[in-house]
Image (cartoon, rainbow, N blue to C red):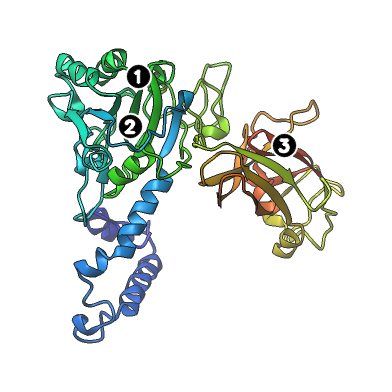
Amino acid sequence: MDVNCGSYLQNHTKSAVLKRKLPVSQIDRALHNLFAVRMRLGLFEGDPTKSLYGNIGPNQVCSQSHQALALEAALNGIVLLKNSAKLLPFSHSNSITLAVIGPNADSPKTLQGNYFGPPCKSISLLQALRGYVKNAAYHPGCADAVNCTSVDIKRAVEVAKGADHVVLVVGLDQSQEREDHDREHLELPGKQEELISAVAKAAKKPVVLVLLSGGPVDVSFAKYDRRIGSILWAGYPGEAGGLALAQIIFGHHNPGGRLPVTWYPKDYVKIPMTDMRMRASPSSGYPGRTYRFYKGPKVFEFGYGLSYSTYSYKLSSPTQNKLYLNLSSSSIAVAAESQQPDSVIVSELSQEFCETKSFSVSVGVENEGEMEGKHSVLLFMKREINNNTNNGGNPLKQLVGFESVKLKAGERGEVEFRLSPCDHLSNANEDGMMVLEQGSRVLLVGEEEYPIHIIF
């Protein structure tokens, strides 16, 4: 690394050099990179205020285009996790009444998460929802923010009973998770679950649950509760997050976000943090880690995300499903020991070979819903299990590409992926080396599968 955000290098670099643990050339490299960037910024050319970037102020930071980008980022990142009986979106009518309940409902600071500057605008979800309906009652539910050690369920229930629809806004904040402060459990803090269940039971109709959190939360109780009709996860969506959530709730935007991590159940914390094995070990009961190897139960899986539309796929490739690599000494920088190996180390293959053996995969996507939407197409690869292949160490599946496509209602589009067998169809062996093996793989998009057979 070139820079340390802290004092570790300041305190220990000299000692490391004296003990010959760190060559001076590595320090020179880091300084070269750091000062090169400063030179490109014009910091050594006189008065910095007269340079190209010397007078950037709030007007440039809070320009209309930047604020529009903040909103776009928030809209694209919000994930719809549940939408039973198409509860969302709500109809845009000033006559409906709304109850907005929860410790994160009127907390614009929570939206910003960690590492942020002063926001251009500070709008909570409660404020944004009041831009859509005239009558939006509010109650925080918890007396001490998301800690929620004290909860006023009686008053929250009364507020919920008086509204046509209820939006519960709960989750975490920086008191629960941040740099240098880890969570000890995967559940909602304090009595939040008790508050949610009581309000959902009292409400006239199934409620909407909005979660603000950086990491996953075990909300299995809400996932299977019929009185909780919709669940939205917003992460920490930034200054425009309140407006983005309101636009999604009232149908001015069709959600299309996908989960970037697996959401594990609460018992997952029983696994020691110091056990960093990726692969599952059935004999010891170890379930593995990440979507590629985890074999235990999931609250929601990596890449999961619903929409107000439904999308169908058609996966095809212009090449045959048999990929003949025709390995020869000319394509391998360091020749393999066997004349006809079952596998070859990727680093032994020339760059030209990997490029010439690349191929295209086309995915047809159709928006079968009634709303325009931006849809993320996720292309996975998995090894086809057979008796002749050792699949124990291979991933259950692996993401090899993703692209977004914006489609109007009823519109069909094409997304193309360019795949290299060296980069996308290889896997790690027991020594940690990336290898390309003979055998069958399956490309996956949704429920669509396309077989690829690698033949040396």
> Which quarter of the figure has residue 132?
top left
Residue identifier under label 1: 205
In what element is the residue under mark 3?
Answer: strand
Which badge, 3 or 2, comes first in the chain's sequence?
Answer: 2
Does residue 190 lie above or below 21 as drawn?
A: above
In the image, residue 326 lies at what x, y percent?
Answer: 85, 54
Front one among 370 and 356: 370
Residue at (33% x, 32% y) in the render? 211
Residue identifier under label 3: 449
Front one among 69 and 35: 69
Which badge, 3 or 1, comes first in the chain's sequence?
Answer: 1
Q: Closer to the camera: disc 3 or disc 1?
A: 1
In three-dimensional space, the C-alpha distance between marks 1 and 2, rounded to whole angstroms, equals 19 Å
In the image, residue 6 lies at what x, y percent?
Answer: 23, 54
In three-dimensional space, the C-alpha distance between marks 3 and 2, rounded to whole angstroms, equals 33 Å
Label 1: how many Cα within 10 Å (few below 14, some 14–19, many 20+): some
Amino acid under disc 3 = Glu
Label 2: how many Cα within 10 Å (few below 14, some 14–19, many 20+): many
Does residue 356 lie above or below 275 as drawn?
A: below
Quadrant placement of the N terminus: bottom left
Label 3: how many Cα within 10 Å (few below 14, some 14–19, many 20+): some
Side of 368 where 166 appears, left or right:
left
Amino acid under disc 2 = Leu
Amino acid under disc 1 = Lys
In the image, residue 240 lies at what x, y percent?
Answer: 29, 49
Q: Which mark is residue 243?
A: none
Res 361 visible: yes
In what element is the residue under mark 2?
Answer: strand
Residue at (73% x, 65% y) in the render? 352
